[in-house]
Image (spheres, rainbow, N blue to C red):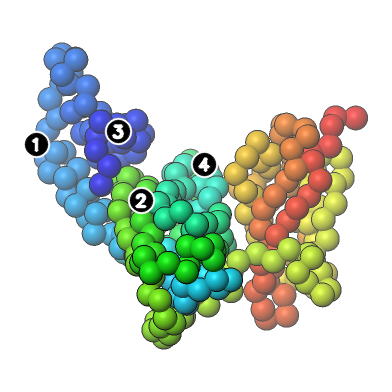
Amino acid sequence: MMTFSSSSLWFCLFGAVGMVACASSAGAQSPSLPEVAPSMTRRASNTAEEAERAVQARLFVESAPVAPGSPLTLALHFEIAPGWNLYWRNSGDSGLPITVKFEAPQGVTIGEARWPTPERHILPGDLLDYAYTRRVTLLFPMSIDPAAAATSTPVTIKANAKWLVCKEACVPGERALEITLPSTIEPLSSRDAELIASARATLPRSAADQTSPIVGVAWSGRALQLSCTGADELIFFPYEGDAQPDDALQNGHVFRDRLSLSYASAETGAPVLGVLQVKRLGQTTYHLIEAPPVPKEP
């Protein structure tokens, strides 16, 4: 768990745990602050302990031959207790995304995370979050320089993962993880193979990766039009950044084949990126949206 000294702002923002943390971190400088009730302290402590147990994280590798030119996929898997959630790369109106900092030997390169598509969570007060429940597996492409692979030194990858886990209250979490790659191929367990397959199944595909793209992308003034002929349901998940839709809560999820989002207040010059989830012909597919920059006002 993160310490109060480094994360008191987070705690101040979220629930009973935040109330206790703010009081404890500020009390030394503000003796006049009212004391926290013992019942609230116990409740906050219970929440923090429950949150600590709510997230289990581990690293594993899809295949692990440490040899020149061998493509690798590093997986960071989270098991999330029922009722709790973690956050996508764009957390939405509240929350914070999962972050990971790797430490690897020279010659080992770890790429950017590939994020499975999340869920829309609508909270009281008309807040819209993009979150994960029950489990999520982030995938990281990894390469090993031939010179590094040729040595007999074990390849050890360390990761420091941070997250915000939420239920009635939100609590930051942190875990130090480590994995040493074996020098020979070790088949994944069926469980881990299933986790990799499930994560890949919800990764968005770009139009260039599709033989016959089915999603249309166009601007109508400062409204983004996303369409898919014959679709029964469309859900848009915008990436983080300055170009955010004004009406994602109302119009980001529709039960028809066309979705229109207003970018009237978005900064111009910034392209719009995100994921469109499409339910069509009994199947659900995920499409990377790479729209041109938001048009300027006429």
Residue holding disc 4:
93
Question: What number is the disc on residue 160?
Answer: 2
Residue 59 appears at what percent x and percent y? 38, 65
Q: Earlier in the sequence, mark 3 or mark 1?
A: 3
The residue type indicated by label 3 comes to Ser
Mark 3 or mark 2: which is in front?
2
The residue type indicated by label 4 comes to Asp
Residue holding disc 1:
38
Callout 2: 10 Å neighbours few (<14), some, many (20+)? some
For the residue pair 231 and 153, the one nearer the viewer reads as: 153
Q: CA distance from mark 1 to mark 2?
A: 33 Å
Q: Secondary structure at mark 1?
A: helix
Q: Secondary structure at mark 4?
A: loop
Residue in view at x 69 percent, y 39 percent: 243
Q: Secondary structure at mark 2?
A: strand
In the visual, does 70 lie left or right of 165? right
Q: Earlier in the sequence, mark 3 or mark 4?
A: 3
Residue holding disc 3:
6
